[in-house]
Amino acid sequence: MASCHAAADRRDIRECAGRCIKTLHFYGCDTAASDYTCFLHGDQLVNSRTCATCNRHALCCFNPKRRTSGHRAAHQCAKFLRGPPVDRVCQRGAGDTPTVPQPLTSSLAGRWAPLATAFLNTVDLSSLLKLFGDVSASLGFPRFAISRVSRRHTGNGRAMAVETLCARYPDHWVAHYAQRDYGPVDPVHRMAFARATPYRWADIRGLNRIEQRVLGEARDAGLTSGVSIPLRETNGDILLVNLASPSPEIKTEVHMRLASSIGALFHQELHRLMKPHRPEPALELSPRQQECLAWVARGKSSWAIASIVGISPHTVDYHIAEAMKILGINSRTAAAVHAVTTGLIHV
């Protein structure tokens, strides 16, 4: 195992890495000496300091809802954490070398790269849909539907238009849904214009009586819970990917993030397969653009990337925006997906 310093120099999150779903920030205690040890936690480089009082490598935990003072050993400090459990932490005592326990769950990054390769290798729409269905089922979503949702101006104002591209829902529900013309009044479709990120059906608020009936009848048909992934098209329409589960709850944030990733992968490969093949000019990203996009692919925010790379969040946003212009993509997630699948960056 490489030292924490070596891992930090390479910006390599795979070595000496602590994983958790939620980004956590750690600070040394007030009496700490000035020597720093690079520490990776939650996929983010932070600093640990050697406490001059107890001569132990110690960490203090800062939680947005609760600030703790004094120093704690890494494994003790973890007890103060609220929110999702830590998969593994890099623990270090006096004179010890860093050790990394085995993760309790598989990481998002470890599953994402093989998925990107699999989607890139699809050869037609049929194989793309089959792969998407298989991956969705492995995440606990055996049913899915893909629709194009748009808003059009009419004599009475703006009306919603829904075009179902593919539905892997129970046949009786598909027939009932079409017969009742539920598309324009489905709250899942309405919410797509209000959200830019995936959302759970259970989180939709302000339902009127018709919308409550649509979701209630969907539950009766076996679509007990679901998550929707809105993917914006260049013409303003939304390609909406709906994943449904017979389970009453969607609890795992990792699955939500993976669902978002496979939605973006599907979106990109759908466009690749539907447009005629023609040679494309070689695209080049600057080293900084590649670095920022690689961290986006790992799920990092601009603030987190700035902390890791050592530049301001504004500069991070600038490099990501420039990369999006070069790639001709108006979503940072989609740009990261494209860069990975085409080999412009590696994660």
Image: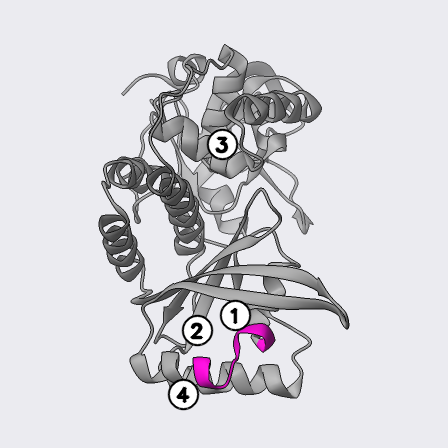
Q: Find residue 220 and name its label.
A: 4
Q: Which residue is farthest right?
A: 156
User: Who comes first in sequence, dot 3 or dot 2?
Assistant: 2
Q: Are marks 3 and 1 in contact (CB under 8 Å)?
A: no
Residue at the image point whose x is 62% and y is 49% from the top: 236
Residue type, mark 2 in image: Ser
Q: Find residue 225 and name its label.
A: 2
Q: Residues within 10 Å of mark 2 (few under 14, many from 20)?
A: many
Determine whether the residue tagged by mark 1 lies in a helix, strand or loop.
helix
Q: Residues within 10 Å of mark 4 (few under 14, many from 20)?
A: few
Distance in Å between CA atoms under marks 3 and 2? 29 Å
Q: Are marks 2 and 1 in contact (CB under 8 Å)?
A: yes
Q: Nearer the viewer, residue 237 or 110?
A: 237
Residue at the image point whose x is 53% and y is 74% from the top: 183
User: Who comes first in sequence, dot 3 or dot 1?
Assistant: 1
Q: Nearer the viewer, residue 203 or 121?
A: 121
**What percent of the width, then of the height, locates residue 123?**
22, 40
Q: Find residue 335 and name its label.
A: 3
Magenta-drawn segment = 178-185
User: Who comes first in sequence, dot 3 or dot 4?
Assistant: 4
Count the marks: 4
Which quadrant would the N terminus be assigned to in this image? top left
* Residue 60 highlighted magenta (yes or no): no
Residue type, mark 4 in image: Asp
User: Who comes first in sequence, dot 2 or dot 4?
Assistant: 4
Distance in Å between CA atoms under marks 2 and 4? 11 Å
**What percent of the width, then of the height, locates residue 163?**
48, 64
**Which quadrant of the view contains residue 279?**
top left
Q: Nearer the viewer, mark 2 or mark 4?
A: 4
Q: Nearer the viewer, residue 310 or 337?
A: 337
Residue at the image point whose x is 51% and y is 43% from the top: 77
**Residue 158 versus residue 55 in the image, above or below:** below
